[in-house]
Amino acid sequence: MQSSEATKKIILQTNLKGYFFEGLNALNKKSLCPVPESVIFYSSDVLDKFALSQDFFDVTDGKVREKILGMKLLEASQLTREEQKKVYKEVADMSLLVCGYFSESTHNKIVDNQYYSQIGRMAYSHLNSMAPSFLDIPSFYNMFATCFESMTTLMSLLATQNRTGLESNLIFKKVLREEIVTEKEMLVSGMIPALTRKVS
């Protein structure tokens, strides 16, 4: 039999999108360089959309494989305008997820987070030229491309918090691995850049 406390937690989480929005928004409020709330809202929608693994992979002839985002971005120019919008959005959103919530998945890949970050920002910029508004906000996707790095840092912090309960653990792990911690990562996590040596 479940405790009343456990029951309350289940009732409070009405949907995944709301859960992600609350978590990202709470982290954003602690950030020294917060992103607009519309960016948080959009990112929560992306996390909700790709919550099911079948949306994250390509299935060809019964074989499941990762989507090759760089190739999809290159091939998009050969498609119709409507197909291009769909592909640009898919590539951009998936790059956001890979760089953000699943950032640790790139550690054993040939290409790194920087590669996916460039692809994501390019795809959002292309998307903006075709469908610039979101929630009646003009040039929304260009704005999102500008906020891309900050947003992926927030998503990485949320993922780390969900796994460990420590929102700043991501930064500490990078320092322990002697990886570079950017000033933006420090600011987004609400930490003062001057307090660490490993800042680029």
Image: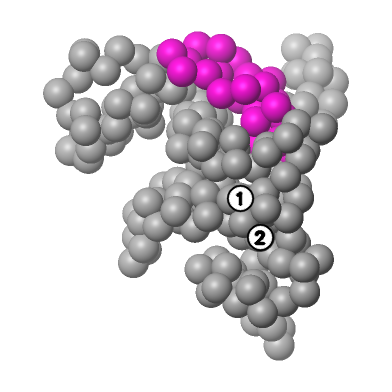
Residue 92, visible in the rendered structure: no
Residue located at (73% from left, 35% from top): 138
Residue furthest left as drawn: 197
Residue 164 at what x, y percent from top left?
47, 28
Q: Taking 55 as reference, is 14 above or below it?
A: above
Question: What element does badge 1 sit on?
Answer: helix
As drawn, is 142 to the left or to the right of 61? left
Q: What is the span of residues highlighted in magenta in the rendered image?
A: 21-45
Residue 111 at what x, y percent from top left?
36, 63
Q: Is tag 1's residue or tag 2's residue first in the polypeptide sequence? A: 2
Which residue lies under the disc numbered 2?
A: 88
Residue 33 at what x, y percent from top left?
46, 18
* Residue 30 magenta: yes
Residue located at (41% from left, 47% from top): 104
Look at label 1 and name its amino acid: Tyr
Q: Taking 154 as reference, is 62 above or below it?
A: below
Residue located at (76% from left, 50% from top): 131
Look at label 2 and name its amino acid: Tyr
* Residue 65 magenta: no
Residue 84 at what x, y percent from top left?
72, 67
Question: What element does badge 2 sit on?
Answer: helix
Circles 1 and 2 in contact, beta carbons < 8 Å: yes
How far, Cα to Cα, is label 1 from label 2? 7 Å
Residue 148, visible in the rendered structure: yes
Q: Main secondary structure of the magenta part?
A: helix
Q: Taking 193 as reference, is 141 above or below it?
A: below
| Quarter occupied by the C terminus | top left
